[in-house]
Image (spheres, coloured by chain):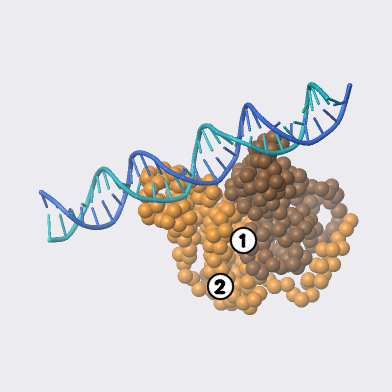
Chain colours: A orange, B brown, C blue, D cyan
Amino acid sequence: MIEAALRVFADRGYDRATVREIARRARVDPALLYHYFAGKAGLFVAAVQARVQPPDRSQVPAGETLAQTAARLVRTALARWGTDARAVPFVALLRGAMSDPAAATLLRGVLERDLLPHLRARLGPGAAALRMGLVAAQLLGLGTVRYVLRLEPVASLPLEELALLAAPAIARALRASPRGAAPRSARVLSGARS
Amino acid sequence: MIEAALRVFADRGYDRATVREIARRARVDPALLYHYFAGKAGLFVAAVQARVQPPDRSQVPAGETLAQTAARLVRTALARWGTDARAVPFVALLRGAMSDPAAATLLRGVLERDLLPHLRARLGPGAAALRMGLVAAQLLGLGTVRYVLRLEPVASLPLEELALLAAPAIARALRASPRGAAPRSARVLSGARS
DNA sequence: TCAATGGTTCAACGCGCGTTGAATTACGGC
DNA sequence: GCCGTAATTCAACGCGCGTTGAACCATTGA
């Protein structure tokens, strides 16, 4: 039932996923879903929380290198989104968050609970929130391009290979810019005219 | 009329945007939209193409540095998405692409037409397609985090500041990994256990 | 054997949506 | 002033959705 819900939510997006189709796929009457869950929204929350919430309680390793942190983030993110190419639970949550404000709040909560602690260990609490935004942008963007937009060749790349390709940029987003870097970039940004 | 459509599509997403609400905001009868455009989908395409399609035909500057390329991409992307914090046309297209497969195709086309040429000048055609996916992931991810999820502090950051923060990671995604980098990262990726 | 309880289905309601074709108004050439 | 044409509105259709309350069925404990 939750299986079917996740599948349909991922395939169609929150709004286009109909309770009737979920019920059909689960070989159940639609009314049964209303007996167990509080409507469509409740079913979505239950389905997502059952699968996206952390199945691991691993501690943040101390003293790892920056590249190690980045690689670990990509790996756990990809693993949690789903082991196969469909990435069902992750896509369901992402697409839901794009449609429904409540689902967006849910996704924000997931990010803060699952991603933020890994950065707090490395950066101060203030910087961690900012860096989390940048890292989350990359992870969500990767999922969007690969699983929703299905933009080639990223969509068909083996997962390991994509992780290797994406890790360096994520590592770069993790590193707080040194004081001197911003002004130089600023000059480039506003002055690059050809 | 197109103004109103973009606004509603951006605020509500494609599926929740109703023709009636767009008409109400444009102070027009819903049926009028069907006279000028071919239904809701046609209205979406017309609205997006009117505003997201390139208003500039600037050539790709030759011989610019990597950082310059990255900064230029961020700047033109942010500028094209919309000058103010709402980023109306971009959000409309992004959210539409998450809901409607046809809109996803439209977004893929926009990326290929607007982003790909900038990378072809720097990398070979094959590598350009792959790198475009990684860069697109970052740009779309930034838009998602800032304008849809409204994750703080990224959502409230001045646009220039965000561009400066994001540019280095995008530059890193632009650079094709040297041959030796992949195996080392692979070892880190699979071996980082603490 | 029977009542009770929890799981499951049936049938339907009401709403709001996208959409349409006819009716109405505004407007420009003669 | 009149007519043809375009712009705009009116009124309504049909559909599929989320949702609901009552009915049905199976299991179980006394």
Residue A129: x %, y % from top left: 63, 71
Near-viewer residue (B144 or D11): D11
CA gap, disc 1 to disc 2? 19 Å
Residue B83 position in % (x across, y down): 77, 58
Total residue callouts: 2
**What x and y, as percent, mark residue B81?**
74, 54
Q: Secondary structure at mark 1?
A: loop
Same chain letter for marks 1 and 2: no
Q: Is residue A108 above or below residue A4?
A: below
Q: Within 10 Å of the Cα at label 2, are there few (<14), some (14-19), or many (20+) other Cα atoms? A: some
The residue under label 1 is which amino acid type? Leu
Q: Is residue A131 at all visible to an observer of this figure?
A: no
Q: For mark 1, what is the residue?
A: B149
Q: Single out the mark in the foreground, 1 or 2.
A: 1
Q: Which mark is residue B81?
A: none
Mark 1 touching mark 2, by CB under 8 A?
Answer: no
Quarter holding the N terminus of chain B is top right
Please say whether residue B10 is visible from this viewpoint. yes
Q: Which subunit holds the residue at mark 1? A: B
Q: Which of these two is toward me, A142 or B88?
A: B88
- The residue to which callout 2 is attached is A117
Residue A61 located left or right of residue A169:
left
The front one of A169 and A30 is A30
- Residue A97 x/y as whole percent: 57, 57
Q: Secondary structure at mark 2?
A: helix
Name the kind of residue labelled 2 in the image: Pro
Q: Residue at x 68, y 71 (%)?
A: A175
Would you say B53 lies left or right of A163 here? right
Query: What is the quadrant of residue B139 in the picture?
Result: bottom right
